[in-house]
Image (cartoon, grey):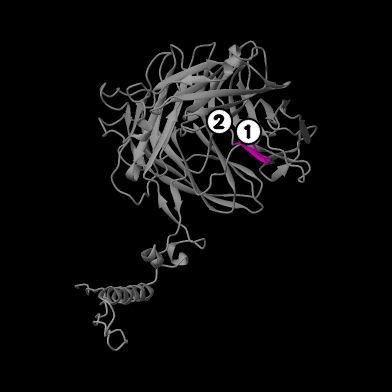
């Protein structure tokens, strides 16, 4: 049946009658006076038409506040140098969840070089040959092509980083339909006995301030700060170090120049030797950089320290594994006031206070650390720090080191204060066969409902979704469902359906050489939309 056509009504402008100057008593007026009066009549008609067609009200624009939202059109993230040594290997993965309103666009990842400086603000190159679905290594693209490209939303792409201990950082840029929710992950496997471990990191936008808690320069520890400048201009960086005795001053930590298109790794022991439990702020004086902090403890594990949210009075650290053999909490109060904190653990039944660790006192400008042992009691969990006296909140930065040991061999991961998942969060590199576990904590006063989706695989498969309920204050674990017919790695998407806030972390376990190698990354809102202010027509502009 033919659909009826609907024609929009045409608005006719009222016919303008020639003014009768004589009737107005202006028959003898000058030509200039008559012209001004005619102009006034025309303006009156224009204003009348404007009033007949008023602008859309704020409520109709989309929100009660009069603002509306739009999907982002470009997303760029920076990954640190792999720091994989001579024998390690690194997999890079890109992923965009489906559902974007836009069409077209590209997404690609390139090594950060002098020639590519500024690529974070430049259009992504056209896709080259398809990436392999094998996370252990794919054929590298041609020298003049991107290292890795993403063909479409809904399925990740994965490929190897450059080989060797001098591999540079990388920058990934997505546009169009590939930009909303675009994410990149980097996972490094090292089997050398002195640096064995699985190191994972979620790539992040270039910025001007980063916090890391849990670094160390004691004997046996090798910690590096990674600085990557993917911008077109130079950057100048200061490293602010806080230890158990207060701020650590070293002129060599200030005014660090990072040229465009370069990657720099600074060994912390050269700035503050022999100090355990360090908190580090990467503060950028000019320009922007991508920053990370990598830790290796000889024979005991390696990983990237999770970046912490900015200092805040209330901090939640999600992602404690059920089988953690050791848990060490490291807290800094970088301001001018001492912090008195209440310590709580989230378990399957909600928040509880750990015995002998009910409170924690942190002096101003200093770092305090405490060993919590197997505080999760064989369950997944999270740590919450709140002011002991709500009337005296003090901003703090917190991190946790967790160890998992088996048959005398261990690996380590570092967690940090995290932001809520928000509307949606994604992670690019997840592995099938029970290697990926999601840990969810509901920090609100009511239960939270979330939707978890495992995407199609990088080499094939069909996505699967699962709805999950998290009781108020509780932490639950979910062994991620493998996509149907999975081939390669897959993307993970977590959406808050109701309740919350929800904090989330994904643990990836890859047993190698009898070691339960693992890494844990938190998930945060992908900020795939931006709020736009509501605008209204102003007829008065005709008089300005």
What is the magenta range?
310-320
- 519 relative to 2 in the view: left or right: right
Label 2, label 1: how far apart the Cα atoms are:
29 Å
Give the residue displayed 61% in from the left and 36% down from the top: 417
Q: Residue furthest left?
A: 2
Residue at disc 1, secondary structure: loop
- 6 relative to 219 in the view: left or right: left
Asked if 470 appears above or below 126 in the picture, the reply is below
Dot label at residue 322: 1
| Label located before the other in sequence (2 or 1) | 2
In percent of width and height, residue 272 lies at 64, 15
The image quadrant where one finds the C terminus is: bottom left
Give the residue displayed 46% in from the left and 17% down from the top: 84
Q: Is residue 226 visible?
A: yes
Which one is in front, 379 or 369? 369
Magenta-colored stretch includes residue 312: yes
The image quadrant where one finds the N terminus is: bottom left
Image quadrant where residue 44 sits: bottom left
In percent of width and height, residue 275 lies at 67, 16
Give the residue displayed 23% in from the left and 82% down from the top: 18
Can you identify the residue that label 2 sits on? 210
Magenta-colored stretch includes residue 109: no
Give the residue displayed 38% in from the left and 34% down from the top: 94
- 275 relative to 134 in the view: left or right: right
Residue at disc 2, secondary structure: strand
């Amino acid at each position: 049946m033919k659909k009826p056509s609907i024609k929009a009504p045409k608005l006719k402008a009222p016919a303008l009658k020639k003014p009768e100057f004589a009737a107005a008593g202006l028959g003898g007026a000058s030509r200039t006076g008559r012209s001004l009066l005619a102009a006034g009549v025309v303006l009156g008609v224009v204003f009348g038409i404007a009033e007949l067609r008023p602008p859309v009200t704020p409520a109709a624009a989309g929100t009660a506040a009069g603002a509306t939202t739009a999907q982002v059109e470009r997303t760029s993230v920076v990954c640190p140098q792999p720091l994989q040594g001579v024998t390690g290997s690194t997999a890079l993965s890109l992923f965009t969840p489906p559902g974007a309103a836009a069409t077209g666009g590209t997404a690609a990842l390139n090594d950060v070089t002098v020639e590519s400086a500024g690529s974070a603000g430049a259009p992504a190159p056209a896709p080259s040959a398809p990436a392999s679905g094998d996370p252990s290594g794919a054929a590298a693209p041609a020298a003049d092509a991107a290292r890795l490209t993403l063909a479409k939303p809904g399925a990740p792409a994965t490929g190897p980083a450059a080989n060797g201990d001098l591999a540079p950082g990388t920058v990934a840029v997505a546009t169009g339909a590939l930009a909303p929710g675009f994410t990149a992950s980097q996972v490094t496997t090292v089997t050398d006995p002195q640096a064995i471990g699985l190191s994972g990191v979620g790539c992040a936008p270039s910025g001007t301030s980063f916090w890391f808690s849990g670094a160390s320069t004691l004997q046996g520890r090798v910690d590096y700060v990674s600085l990557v400048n993917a911008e077109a201009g130079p950057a100048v960086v200061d490293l602010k170090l806080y230890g158990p005795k207060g701020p650590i001053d070293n002129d060599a930590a200030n005014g660090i120049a990072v040229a465009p298109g370069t990657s720099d790794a600074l060994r912390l022991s050269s700035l503050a030797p022999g100090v355990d439990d360090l908190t580090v702020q990467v503060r950028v004086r000019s320009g922007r950089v991508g920053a990370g902090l990598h830790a290796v403890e000889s024979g005991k594990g390696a990983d990237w320290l999770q970046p912490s949210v900015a200092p805040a009075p209330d901090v939640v650290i999600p992602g404690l594994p059920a089988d953690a053999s050791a848990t060490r909490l490291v807290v800094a109060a970088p301001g001018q006031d001492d912090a008195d904190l209440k310590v709580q653990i989230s378990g399957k039944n909600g928040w509880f206070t750990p015995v002998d660790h009910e409170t924690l006192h942190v002096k101003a400008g200093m770092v305090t650390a405490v060993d919590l042992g197997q505080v999760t009691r064989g369950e997944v969990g999270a740590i919450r720090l709140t002011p002991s006296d709500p009337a005296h909140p003090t901003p703090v930065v917190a991190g946790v080191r967790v160890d998992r040991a088996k048959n005398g061999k261990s690996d380590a991961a570092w967690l940090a204060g995290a932001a809520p998942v928000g509307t949606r969060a994604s992670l690019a590199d997840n592995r099938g066969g029970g290697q990926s576990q999601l840990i969810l904590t509901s920090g609100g006063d009511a239960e939270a409902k979330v939707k978890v989706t495992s995407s199609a695989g990088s080499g094939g498969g069909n996505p699967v979704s699962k709805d999950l309920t998290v009781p108020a204050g509780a932490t639950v674990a979910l062994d991620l469902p493998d996509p149907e017919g999975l081939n390669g790695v897959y993307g993970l998407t977590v959406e808050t359906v109701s309740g919350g806030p929800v904090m989330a972390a994904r643990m990836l376990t890859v047993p190698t050489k009898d070691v339960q190698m693992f890494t844990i990354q938190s998930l945060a809102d992908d900020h795939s939309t931006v709020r736009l202010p509501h605008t209204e027509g102003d007829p008065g502009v005709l008089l300005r």
